[in-house]
Image (cartoon, rainbow, N blue to C red):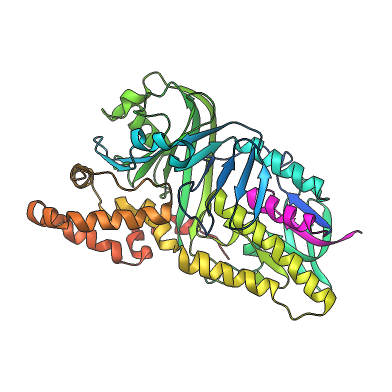
Amino acid sequence: MKKYDLVVVGAGPCGLLAAKAAGQAGLNVALLERKSDMTRIERTCGQTFVSMNDYYFGDLVTYNRKGKRIVFPKNGFSFNYDGPTKNSYAWHIYSPNGNVLPFGLPEETRKKGDYGAVALSYDKEILLRCILEEAKEAGVEVFPGINVNDIASTSEGVKIDGSGKTFEALYAIAADGCNSRIAKLLGFNKNRTAYCYLFSKSWYMRNVKAPDLDILISSITYKTVAPGYLFIFPRPYGDDLTVVFLTLDPRVNLDDVANDYMKENPFFSEWFKKAELMEQYASAQYMFSPIIEPYKDRILLAGDTGSTQELENSGAMISGWKAGNAIVTALKEERVGLKSQGISDYIKWWKATYIEGYRHEDYIMNFALPFVIDNEEDLNYIFSLVKDPLPPCWNPYAAIGHLGKLIQSLIPTIQKERPDILPKLGKMSKPMIEILETTNKACKPLLDLD
């Protein structure tokens, strides 16, 4: 049996970048993926880079159009992307009656061209293919169709079993996503707070008559037993869009959420009268507190595997790149007799960045707003008070800070006109597990983390 320096489990953006980093440094790397076609998209994904106009997990993503490369300048890596792209120039959140909370005005941000974009849409299947090709060029051995069912430490490293095959390595990186089997097998989930599941159903659509087709759009509906959400992402093909309906609560039928937006709501239904529904996707993902120590017994966690829900594609890539280089450094240290530092540096970065710098409660609050402002009338009212645009943004962590400042500026008006709303706004400072209490209880039977 061949023994590798590193086995990477999961060939999403995180795992691919981890494998590429280690392969380019000369390590013998095996990349395992559950899917038989590594580049095929099988679940809901907005397929956008977050964020293009401010720092996200410490980097400022750039697209080199001439050279066709995605660049992470602060972390010093890039990769080829030869597919189509489209800029998104703002993020607009709509209340149920169509009042809008604008993060940027597209008529202004478009004037800046690429530098006015808050996000970049791409074709993820092409992106995965491009990174996979670079990983293979770096000598990474690729094993599709491997469903990992066991992982254990050995006297000399790590042994991984899956789909009738066994792989041995000095180190392993788990990049198998939010519903990570490896995190569960190794007991990483035991001390995590389970908040809920995030369920989604989505379609590629065309002929949607949204106000702008080069902005990101989201909204909230209260017509179901628990809040439902709409997200619209531009696709890099003509006027095609990815339209996503989601919820945090398993009692909600996502077909009801879709029906409300596409047929019942008098404001939104106009957008969808001639919509053509094409490919359909879905997803179900844990949402819980992050793993504080993402390392155990020569196994390093990266990306969504140790996070609250998703680090988004940008964050996953940064984490994967850093994890791959952490293993490169650790093996070099072992072989030349230096004090171990590579793994500990990665852990320090993880804690400083994801645990402290990008708080998971802030990320979840993007979904928890309708649990604070808990009815349609109140949300319509608050959005009606918004007179000026917020800063252009497609960053879930920064957006909550902007929203908090906005609400503070509206407090005098709310105090005068609708003082009954103030106690609700006070809930925003409560622990997230309390804010999501009813949905958490509904999800409990599904949250098999141990």
Q: Which residue occupies 46% across, 66% down? A: 357
The percent coordinates of residue 439 (x first, y second) are 38, 55
Image quadrant where residue 148 sits? bottom right
Q: Camera-side residue: 43 or 448?
A: 43
Q: Is residue 1 above or below residue 201?
A: below
Q: Quadrant of the C terminus?
A: bottom right
Q: Is residue 59 left or right of residue 374?
A: right
Residue 8 lies in the magenta-colored region: yes
The percent coordinates of residue 192 (x first, y second) are 51, 68
Residue 293, visible in the rendered structure = no
Q: Is residue 68 above or below residue 162?
A: above
The percent coordinates of residue 57 (x first, y second) are 52, 58
Residue 99, visible in the rendered structure = yes
The percent coordinates of residue 288 (x first, y second) are 48, 61
Q: Is residue 148 left or right of residue 279?
A: right
Extreme-right residue of the structure = 1
Extreme-left residue of the structure = 416
Image quadrant where residue 150 sits? bottom right
Q: Which residue occupies 37% across, 63% down? A: 432
Q: Which residue occupies 73% across, 56% down? A: 21
Q: Which residue occupies 43% across, 20% down? A: 207
Q: How many marks?
A: 0
Q: Camera-side residue: 159 or 236?
A: 236
Residue 268 lies in the magenta-colored region: no
Q: Camera-side residue: 322 or 9?
A: 322
Looking at the rendering, the stretch of residues picked out in magenta corresponds to 1-26
Image quadrant where residue 360 sits? bottom left
Q: Camera-side residue: 366 or 69?
A: 69
Q: Quadrant of the N terminus?
A: bottom right
Q: Is residue 295 left or right of residue 165?
A: left
Q: Is residue 359 above or below residue 34?
A: below
Q: Is residue 33 left or right of residue 216?
A: right
